[in-house]
């Protein structure tokens, strides 16, 4: 390979990386010389895509990009679908902050030397009564807020140790009569080494189109007058439309490693005899709407019967511990996780995984 080709390839990579994770949006954010330390938090739409999915994964602090498997891998790393051996159904219910209902449903099964899956994520509020300046106690009319993401994923083993996967998803945000839409993809990979179960995972998630709200409530009448004074000329109304701008979605690059600590004490002949595992996992996140974040997680797996998990998440504007546990009875996994979000109180998540 010539030196010239290597240089060109490097420049193309740097250009693409800069486009994906550019810190400033020319249309929406001030130039860097005005606010050199402007935070990127809150500069993306569809942030529900960042809420963790799955009690096992949440109990481990979200440090799961290298351990992804089953239906929830469609959220964390679609390369995990490559290990699908049976039909699996995963259902999750999570009472998120400010009384929002967070739900996940996913199915996965073996397909074409790998695995395929379909997932649905929703975040919705209860009906909220509309209030106005004239009627602050309520008008008797209600509105809803809801988010929805539907994804189709496929993962495949390229070798006996390396797998790749991808997800294509349709995203919608809706409030009252206004809605915004986007199409995005995830691309991930997992490398399983023969060094004591050590794994390496990478995932680029939510790379897609920007979102802009449209709807009938943005059409408003605009009152105009002729002449120099309102009293001297008749007024008339024209139909106008409020202008909305495009917002990027929360693209994120994750890199993680994981290893089974119990296997470090076993010889080659003893591996797999105990049936228990102690996973330790670490993940670094680089989002386009925030600074670098770090996640650490652990899980003790007692012979695929009982599980205890703990983790810690460190992000730009918050850090908090997590823990959870689970049981497996005749192919049915029931998992629970807890996260302390500080001023937002705690979040409890329940997940059921059925292996057919």
Image: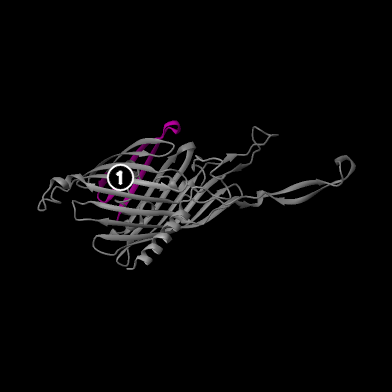
- Residue 4 highlighted magenta (yes or no): no
Q: Is residue 140 left or right of residue 146?
A: right
Q: Quadrant of the C terminus?
A: bottom left
Q: Quadrant of the N terminus?
A: bottom left
Residue 231 in the image, given as x and y percentages of width and height: 88, 40
Res. 259 in view: yes
- Which residue is depicted at the point 33% across and 41% down? 59
Query: Bounds of the magenta span?
Result: 327-356
Residue designated by label 1: 282
Q: Nearer the viewer, residue 87 or 153?
A: 153
Q: Is residue 120 above or below residue 316?
A: below
Q: Is residue 203 above or below residue 350?
A: below
Q: Nearer the viewer, residue 85 or 141?
A: 85
- Dot 1: what SS? strand
Which quarter of the figure has residue 109?
bottom left
How many numbered discs sit on the rendered protein?
1
Res. 60 in view: no
Q: Residue furthest front?
A: 3
Residue 26 in the image, given as x and y percentages of width and height: 56, 50
Residue 335 in the image, given as x and y percentages of width and height: 32, 43
- Which residue is depicted at the point 28% across and 59% down? 83
Residue 311 in the image, given as x and y percentages of width and height: 31, 39
Give the colour scheme of this rendering.
Answer: one colour
- Residue 339 highlighted magenta (yes or no): yes
- Which residue is depicted at the point 40% across and 54% down? 204
Q: Is residue 180 left or right of residue 66?
A: right
């Amino acid at each position: 390979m010539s030196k010239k080709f290597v240089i060109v390839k490097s420049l193309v990579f740097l250009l693409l990386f800069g486009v994906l994770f550019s810190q400033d949006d020319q249309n929406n954010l001030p130039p860097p010389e005005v606010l050199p330390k402007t935070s990127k938090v809150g500069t993306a739409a569809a942030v529900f895509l960042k809420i963790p999915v799955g009690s096992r994964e949440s109990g481990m602090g979200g440090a799961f990009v290298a351990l992804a498997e089953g239906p929830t891998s469609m959220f964390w790393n679609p390369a995990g679908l490559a290990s699908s051996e049976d039909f699996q159904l995963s259902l999750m219910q999570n009472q998120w902050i400010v009384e929002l209902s967070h739900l996940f449903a996913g199915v996965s099964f073996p397909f074409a030397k790998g695995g395929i899956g379909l997932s649905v994520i929703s975040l919705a509020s209860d009906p909220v009564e509309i209030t106005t300046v004239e009627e602050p106690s309520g008008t008797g009319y209600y509105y809803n807020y809801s988010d929805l993401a539907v994804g189709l994923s496929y993962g495949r083993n390229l070798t006996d140790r390396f797998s790749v996967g991808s997800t294509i998803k349709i995203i919608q945000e809706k409030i009252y009569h206004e809605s915004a839409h986007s199409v995005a993809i995830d691309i991930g990979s997992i490398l399983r080494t023969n060094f004591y179960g050590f794994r390496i995972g990478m995932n680029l998630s939510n790379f897609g189109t920007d979102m802009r709200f449209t709807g009938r409530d943005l059409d408003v009448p605009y009152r105009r007058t002729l002449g120099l004074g309102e009293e001297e000329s008749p007024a008339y109304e024209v139909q106008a439309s409020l202008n909305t701008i495009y917002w990027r979605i929360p693209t994120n690059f994750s890199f993680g490693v994981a290893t089974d600590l119990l296997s470090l004490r076993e010889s080659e002949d003893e591996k797999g005899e105990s049936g228990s595992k102690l996973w330790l996992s670490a993940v670094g996140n680089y989002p386009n709407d925030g600074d670098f974040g770090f996640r650490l997680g652990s899980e003790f797996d007692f012979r695929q019967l009982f599980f205890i998990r703990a983790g810690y998440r460190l992000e730009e504007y918050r850090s908090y511990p997590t823990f959870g546990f689970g049981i497996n009875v005749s192919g049915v996994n029931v998992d629970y996780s807890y996260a302390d979000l500080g001023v937002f109180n705690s979040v409890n998540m329940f997940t059921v995984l059925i292996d057919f």
